[in-house]
């Protein structure tokens, strides 16, 4: 046969073999196997000297297909699945992580940074009406100074925190939660003082606040005795998105 007739015959065989498939292979590996079988069969049927160019053509096509298949298999993808999951696909397997878990990790990190920065202000003198750490801070000014450092919007005065955030039980308090107290008169159950919880070990709560009755201003205190009688509630402001207010 002439080279032209060989090409025509082989092209016809390729089309015929492919059209005779009664199903589409379930994956690229099955497709690769089908083509390799077809190429091997046609290679053996056309071993004469005149089919050399066609063998080169088959080899080139087969190599290209191999590169495509293995390149596709190495590709990694991330899908957002229904029911609150992030699924990562890779050649080893699948892993899923709940979005809530990711959110909790981010929240814990943010609260930890919040507390760490608050501690750096220890010793800042008390100054009524101030939110400037370089000059001094009152109790709500201290909360505002820490919150402003992280771009978190909170009310300016302590009493405005009464309906702010999410109320939590003392036993469930975590670092970064805000603790609200009455003023100096525990009989008046109106928020007049506040601080930031830095620790809760088996119900023993520690908080940092700017106290007008202490020469050092920003100090760490235990929730016991006098402060325990003044406790109004504990609130959580993390995540902050739903708790932002205009100021």
Image (tube, rainbow, N blue to C red):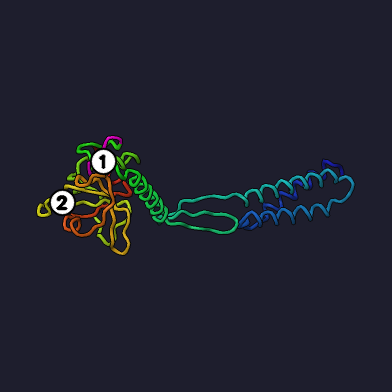
| Residue at position x 53%, y 58% in the image | 94
User: Is the C-beta separation of discs 1 and 2 under 8 Å?
Assistant: no
- Element marked by disc 1: loop
Residue at the far left in the pictured view: 187
| Residue at position x 12%, y 54% in the image | 186
Indicate the quadrant where residue 223 lies. bottom left
Bounds of the magenta segment? 134-139
Residue at the far bottom in the pictured view: 202
Query: In terms of depth relative to the viewer, which is nearer, 85 or 131?
Result: 131
Few, some or many residues within 10 Å of mark 2 (<14, 14–19, 20+): many
| Foreground tag (1 vs 2) | 1
Q: Is residue 107 left or right of residue 34?
A: left
Percent of width and height locating residue 52: 85, 45
| Residue at position x 30%, y 37% in the image | 133
Percent of width and height locating residue 215: 23, 44
Percent of width and height locating residue 51: 85, 46
Judging by the rendered image, the residue that carries numbered circle 2 is 182
Percent of width and height locating residue 135: 27, 35
Residue at the far front in the pictured view: 215
**Any magenta on residue 148?**
no
- Element marked by disc 2: strand
Query: In terms of depth relative to the viewer, which is nearer, 228 or 93?
Result: 228
- The tag on residue 125 is 1
Residue at the far right in the pictured view: 49
Query: In terms of depth relative to the viewer, which is nearer, 76 or 165?
Result: 165
| Residue at position x 69%, y 47% in the image | 67
Q: Is residue 156 left or right of residue 189?
A: right
């Amino acid at each position: 046969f002439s080279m032209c007739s060989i090409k025509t015959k082989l092209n016809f065989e390729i089309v015929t073999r492919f059209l005779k498939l009664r199903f589409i292979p379930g994956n690229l590996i099955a497709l690769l196997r089908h083509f390799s079988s077809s190429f091997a069969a046609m290679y053996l049927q056309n071993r004469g000297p005149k089919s050399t160019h066609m063998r080169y053509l088959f080899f080139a096509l087969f190599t290209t297909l191999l590169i495509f298949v293995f390149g596709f298999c190495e590709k990694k993808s991330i899908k957002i699945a229904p029911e609150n999951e992030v699924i990562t696909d890779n050649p080893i397997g699948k892993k899923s992580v709940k979005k809530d878990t990711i959110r909790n990790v981010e929240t814990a990190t943010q609260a930890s940074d919040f507390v760490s920065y608050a501690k750096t202000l220890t010793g800042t003198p008390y100054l009524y009406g101030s939110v400037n750490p370089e000059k001094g801070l009152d109790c709500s000014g201290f909360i505002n100074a820490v919150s402003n450092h992280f771009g978190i919007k909170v009310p300016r005065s302590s009493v405005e925190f009464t309906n702010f955030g999410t109320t939590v039980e003392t036993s469930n308090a975590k670092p970064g939660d805000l603790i609200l107290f009455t003023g100096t008169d525990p009989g008046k159950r109106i928020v007049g003082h506040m601080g930031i919880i830095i620790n809760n070990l088996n119900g023993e709560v520690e908080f940092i606040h700017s106290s007008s009755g202490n020469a050092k201003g920003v100090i760490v205190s235990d929730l016991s005795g006098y402060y325990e009688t003044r406790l109004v509630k504990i609130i959580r402001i993390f995540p902050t998105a739903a708790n932002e207010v205009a100021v």
